[in-house]
Image (cartoon, rainbow, N blue to C red):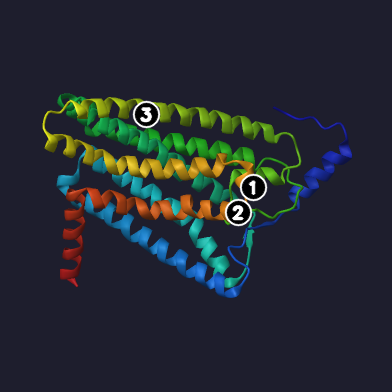
């Protein structure tokens, strides 16, 4: 949708205001210096835990030949997206907390917005593909090798990354093409689409809302597929005669369900919570939860329930300590 401005002076004023922005101001995590340093230490600890956990999973899967299966291949890709998500939002927040500043260059929010959407969309698409992996493994085990061969897995992973790249590119290009005339202060500690839309002074932001609606429809399609797949999975598991077989089948699904639930619940509640519950402190806590804490928890969730992965990580760490 294109908005035509009849007043040339208003149009010139919009262009002037938009072009005059050379930097943005991010939301400060705290006002007091002691709390800023505390937030820096917390972010440092969480980011190091995320880097260590996801790095160990990537190394264990890459080095362990017995883990070269579709499930662990997709898990490696998921760990890469978690690392990307942490590296997108946390370093600048740590820098601002340590040096008591809020500034970020004009290109900084664009880069943050692109990479955050890219990582989040890739993670959701990968979780959808991992659901298909669990469905085939439990419901059609005899066709597992045919439906999820190495080439098919590579194609599905590539489709997830490419679709997320196009999604991020369209949202970033469309969002930062809007004229901005309502200041340069963002109400978040990293750049998000809603924060940029609040600064827009043109009704052309409806184009971005339309793009968001299309993205939500695609997300709903993935969600419906996940729900349908797990209905079939639970029906197949309940038909397994032995209790040990049912437990083994459920144990392979629990980590995926836990990560998926954490990812969806935090994101959906943050975006669609009632206005009566909205407050700066709650919004900030939710954003930290889905952008920082979730990528750090994912490796722990997967490693706690998967004995093969735990054994591979332990062997990798033991080998590293022996070399030193």
Give the structural element (helix, strand or loop) at label 2. Answer: loop
Residue 188's tag is: 2
In the picture shown, does residue 8 fall above or below 300?
above
Q: Neighbour class for label 1 at 10 Å: few (<14), some, many (≥20)? A: some
- Mark whose residue sits in front, 3 or 2: 3
Name the image quarter holding residue 122: top left
Q: Circle 1 sits on which residue? A: 195
- Earlier in the chain: of badge 2 and badge 1, it is 2
Q: Where is residue 46? Give x, y as percent.
A: 41, 62
Tags 3 and 1 in contact by the CB under 8 Å rule?
no
Give the structural element (helix, strand or loop) at label 3. Answer: helix
Looking at this view, name the residue that lies furthest to the bottom: 34
Q: Neighbour class for label 3 at 10 Å: few (<14), some, many (≥20)? A: few
Give the structural element (helix, strand or loop) at label 1. Answer: helix
* Front position in the image: 15 or 171: 171
Q: Where is residue 196? Give x, y as percent.
A: 65, 46
Q: Circle 3 sits on which residue? A: 227
Name the image quarter holding residue 71: top left
Q: Where is residue 167? Give x, y as percent.
A: 51, 36
- Earlier in the chain: of badge 3 and badge 2, it is 2
Quarter of the image where the C terminus is located:
bottom left
Q: What is the CA distance from the residue labelled 2 to the residue labelled 1? A: 7 Å
Which residue does the image show at 25% across and 52% down from the upper left? 304
Q: Neighbour class for label 2 at 10 Å: few (<14), some, many (≥20)? A: some
């Amino acid at each position: 949708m294109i908005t035509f401005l009849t007043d040339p002076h208003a149009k010139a004023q919009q262009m002037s205001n938009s072009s005059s922005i050379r930097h943005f101001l991010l939301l400060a995590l705290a006002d007091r210096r002691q709390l800023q340093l505390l937030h820096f230490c917390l972010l440092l600890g969480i980011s190091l835990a995320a880097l260590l956990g996801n790095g160990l999973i990537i190394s264990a899967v890459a080095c362990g030949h017995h883990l070269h299966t579709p499930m662990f291949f997709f898990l490696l890709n998921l760990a890469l997206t978690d690392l990307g998500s942490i590296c997108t939002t946390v370093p600048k927040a740590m820098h601002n907390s340590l040096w008591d500043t809020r500034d970020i260059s004009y290109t900084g929010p664009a880069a943050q917005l692109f990479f955050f959407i890219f990582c989040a969309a890739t993670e959701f698409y990968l979780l959808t593909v991992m659901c298909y992996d669990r469905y085939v493994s439990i419901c059609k085990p005899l066709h597992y090798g045919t439906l999820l061969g190495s080439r098919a897995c590579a194609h599905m992973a590539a489709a997830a990354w490419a679709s997320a790249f196009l999604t991020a590119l369209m949202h970033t290009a469309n969002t930062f093409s809007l004229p901005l005339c309502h200041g340069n202060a963002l109400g978040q500690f990293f750049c998000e689409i809603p924060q940029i839309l609040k600064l827009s002074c043109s009704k052309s932001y409806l184009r971005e809302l339309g793009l968001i609606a299309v993205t939500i429809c695609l997300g709903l399609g993935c969600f419906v597929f996940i729900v349908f797949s797990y209905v079939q999975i639970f029906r197949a598991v309940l038909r397994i005669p032995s209790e040990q077989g049912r437990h083994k089948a459920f144990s392979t699904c629990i980590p995926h369900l836990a990560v998926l639930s954490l990812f969806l619940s935090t994101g959906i509640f943050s975006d669609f919570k009632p206005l009566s519950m909205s407050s700066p402190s709650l919004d900030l806590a939710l954003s930290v939860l889905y952008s920082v804490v979730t990528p750090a928890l994912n490796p722990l969730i997967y490693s706690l329930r998967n004995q093969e992965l735990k054994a591979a990580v332990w062997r990798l760490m033991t080998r590293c300590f022996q070399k030193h």
